[in-house]
Amino acid sequence: MSAGILLEPCCSRCTHSPSRPCADLLACIQNGPLCHDDPDCRAAREARLEQVLRGGAGTVIFVGAATCGRANGALHVMDKIKSYLEARSLPASVVEVGCVGYCQREVFVDLQNGNGVRLSYCDLDPENVGEFLEAVFEKNDLRNRFLYGRYGEAAGFEDIPLVADTPFFARQTRVVLDNCGLIDPSSLDGALAAGGFAAAARALTSMTREEVCETVTASGLRGRGGAGFPTGQKWKVALNTPAAQKYLICNADEGDPGAFMDRAVLESDPFRVVEGMLIAAYAIGATKGYVYCRAEYPLAIVRLQEAITQCRTAGLLGGNILGSLTDFDIIIKQGAGAFVCGEETAILASIEGGRGMPRSRPPYPAVAGLHGMPTVLNNVETLANVPGILRNGPEWFRELGIGEAAGTKVFALSGRVQNTGLVEVPVGIPLREIVSTIGGGAPEGHRIKAVQIGGPSGGCIPEEFLDVPTDYGKLQELGAMMGSGGMVVMDERSCMVDVAKYFMEFIRNESCGKCAPCREGTTRMFEILTALTERTGGDEIRRLERFRGLLHLEELAQTIKDTSLCGLGQSAANPVLSTLRYFRDEYEAHVMEERCPAGVCQGLRTYAIDTSTCIGCMACKKVCPSGAIVGERKNAHYIIVDRCLGCGACVDACPKHSISLVA
Amino acid sequence: MIINNRELDFTPGETVLQIARRAGIKIPHLCSLEWAPSPSASCRLCVVEVDGSPKLQTSCTLQATDGMVVRTHTPRVLKARRTIVELMVANHPQDCLGCHRAGSCELADLARELGVRSRQYVGMKKDQHLDISSPAIWRDPNKCVLCGRCVTMCHDIQGVGAIDFIGRGFRTQVGPGFYAGINVSGCTYCGQCARVCPTGALMEHMQVDDVVAALGDPDTVVVAQIAPAVPATLALERSKSPSVQVMLEHMSAALEHIGFAAVFDTAFCADVTIMEEASEFIQRLQGGGTLPMFTSCSPAWINYVELHRPDLIPHLSTCKSPQQMAGALIKEIYPKYAGLEGKRLVLVSIMPCTAKKYEAEDLGDVDHVLTTRELDTLWDRFGIDFKAFEERRPLDPPFAEATGAARLFASTGGVMEAAVRTAAVLAGAEEPAGPLTEARGLDGIKFFNVDVAGTTLNLAVVNGLGRLRPVLDESMSRLHFIEVMSCPGGCAGGGGQPYHGDIMDVRKRMDRIYQADAQAEVRSSHENKSVAALYEEYLGQPLSEVSHRLLHRHYTDRSATVRRGEDAVTSGVAAHAAAGSGSR
């Protein structure tokens, strides 16, 4: 694979070659050539850099085609654009980029004209892309209805808001996601032109390992995978543990439901992760690295593999990197779909070829990890933060955060908010600001009830506590946790018992089965929650069991939390504990009254027919799967509650809208 | 450090569980296993409260530090332990009455200790298949509490890896890969898994009922042979701890009470084995045969070679194990000797071993094999209170006399020691004086040299299948003779030995065996007069044609069985899917 044009020698005097880049490779790309002085060569290099930065000559169309974009039809959009250009022989190039993170408005397409004006359009899909192309190329209407914003100084379009000033982006601070959706993720040139690998070059050639660890410690960076362990400290432990071989593992086994931060970074800016890994490996003295990525992320794996191959070709991975005598290479290890394999000791077991089951710590992996050797495991986002810290200094990173907290955190905002997508915000920002300002609050006419943060290990924070800063400690006090960044917003249409049941089912299915409390306990908790969401039909024993179940629920939760082997088990009960803490009334409505206030739990839903408007057409009676509706033709019908399954088929069948949910 | 307000000393690296045990504080636990390289910490029952730590800590992984303050039975700890046991009980069959572990079940003990009196949780239960595919080891995954001792044993200690955790979450079970039967799993039937199982999930294929049926049949003559490790084990259960010979005579008397017509000493055939094996070794050594030669007494080791290392078959001694030699000789000679022509002769072996069950089925001659554990059941069935049984009865000729060398077969290193004594003489040298201390003890692997008639023999003793690797990998070519016993400690620690035995028990049994050797009047196999008579009257000489017909065997490359197990994926998975993956 070509390493790209930036690494090509400019003339025969140039001593650089893609396979043997010299130590000042990056300086040479930015201000070269360094090995000889020739204005022509300098101009040629500047032109090349310019071309890479622009993405191509003339008009360039960037299509955001990461997995989320593709789900919205980005590949079809791109095909249609290409065939449109081809049919009309229009001299424009199409570049596939990653994801800007605004899922709600996908597909994003950026248009860059010959003058370097880059405008961003959104809400495209395979159906309306024709209209868009017609507006742009035939009517020359660049201010069509799809226009979202501009990038940079766009001459002639100053009245259009900058993308960064639009409501979704204005409150964000983009560090990790800085290049996402802007550069070509499959091109090392693109990454180099955007300043990539400058930090790694500095670390490898002019800093000691201790200095790198110190810098990261001073920056206050904490693990972004959930637990929040100070990254620099972890590195230092591994650095100070003498061993013949050390390993660095990038944890890309992102498994929380509703979390896709790591995928977006890997798909949209894989070089940043590779650079972060290179720096981390240098800092701890590791020569082998693994990316443990779930196989459900095929595009991320392809992008990462491309990045690794190009970096090897360019001498940024392999032996004697940038003349620093540092060796490092990366292997991608695909996970087979177990949630628990995001736990660090389970990753080790999985990479070693064993069954992905956690083991008890200590020894911590930084002391004895993969094959018993010191091993540092960092999350994708953690590593993606490292180049910025090295480039801009630890103070810069500290100041990014609010208050005591340092840096930024990417959240995957989803659920009942107007704007869903990836948001990168300063750590310590109040939750409400993310949900209301960036997310735009609940959809029209609804009120936010709670925010679920931290995935299956996290908890639900009720609306009244939304002013809490997103800080590791503060969230834990409320029974939630920072987690890896999943954030699900719920309004009054969500049933909190159902939410707890959903997460418990997830954990129950994903428990590795090793330790008894997690394996057996989560199943029992799930069974108890399921019983709460079903009617007893007046059966006294079942009623009794439900009451007893509610008592057991807290007891089980406490034992699972106290005694489970790994983090998955220890936090498995959090969704139940936090909903019990803040939404006890909902549990009580389910148990005492056999009623789901939100009308979500099908087993507890009850419908009633308004006899004053029922015309006795029998449509509902015909569709009812359980024979719960009685009534004669042309007379009002009735629902027998004990027979009703709560499926709601009758509601859809009724021509007079006479059937409604009884809350 | 301080446990429950008691100040206790410790050596660095010791865990709280070990320290507490020494101090007489019982912390319940299911998953921890002696000899395991690292604790699996999966049962979570040994949790304790540690001052300064908000979480409960597992005492099996917690290494003591100066000033550490631990409390082992606080209300919080008791509650957690009880909930865990309640959860295990909720997912356990309620057929304790019919379980062979009734009375020795560790889960039942825990439930009693922690006050679990009823099922607290009603819901799904395991519904998995009984695996009775092998003649040696049976599995009932429904009774499994997933403590993982068997997996630790099979992987980390025995190095076989036939069973592992399969499935995920609530559907996790322990078994061979792809839900296949254990008969196609690469299992050597060493039975160590069953020995350490806390419940009835792993067991030997029980043959007590078959023996009882044979005893009740008037047309059948039932005789028994007793392996030397069994009396050595049973002796330790008695307060006076009599010698191996005395225990054999007690057993002989008790078995006669039950209805056995004759009781033979397998050790007699251990002497025959030595005659044959030592001769074979000398022949290989002097005749340029395949070296090194491996012993072939341990059937699980034979299974290991046939299944996993068929390339080693030429190195295996062709001698049958003492059990099978005894089987062949008894079936051949005894009917004429005792005038039993026309009657059905049933031979029951009493062995410390589960793999012998497979061997008996594979080679014939031996009809039923009872483990040391099953023997207990047999006593119970016939109302024999064996611990108080004082009658004695000599063993039956012509297979009654055994030497000290033969007694040593029950312990790791013993076959080597016995063989060296006789091989030296066969090679025309002096018999070595005193015990061969290099071969004794519980070290995983022992290398040593013995000079025989001017030749230095490089010998090795492997104590357990898990310690094979150093022999097989590096040093094989420079060795002459290697003893392999599949179980840690040899037959004294065999897979058919009593449950709960820890390594101290094995050591005591071995001491008893060494003592039997020291006390024996005749200490070398070639000096056994009955053996000499047998050769004179019947076999001719070692390695004769008759010997080959009766006392030697062939081996089969069965490595395809293990691979076929993997091919069975399709059918196995289909069967599993049909079973609804274990939920009711």
Image: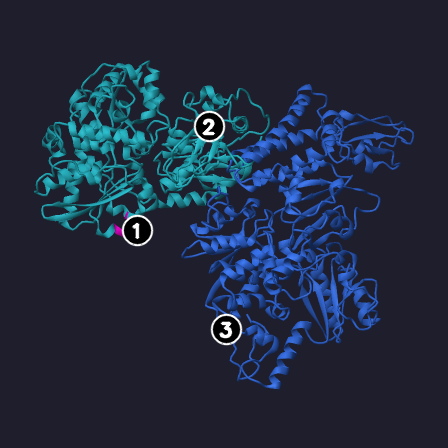
Chain colours: A blue, B cyan
Is B353 left, or right, of A378 in this rendering? left
Q: Is residue B204 visible?
A: no
Is B234 left, or right, of A424 in this rendering? left
The amino acid at mark 3 is: Ser
- Circles 1 and 3: CB atoms closer than 8 Å: no
Q: Chain of mark 3?
A: A
The residue under label 1 is B473
Mark 3: which secondary structure? loop
The amino acid at mark 2 is: Asn
Mark 1: which secondary structure? helix
Callout 2: 10 Å neighbours few (<14), some, many (20+)? some
* Sequence-first tag of 1 and 2: 2
The amino acid at mark 1 is: Asp
The residue under label 3 is A19
- The CA span between labels 2 and 3 is 66 Å
* Residue closer to the observer: A458 or B298: A458
Q: Quadrant of residue A476?
A: top right
Q: Is residue A561 visible?
A: yes
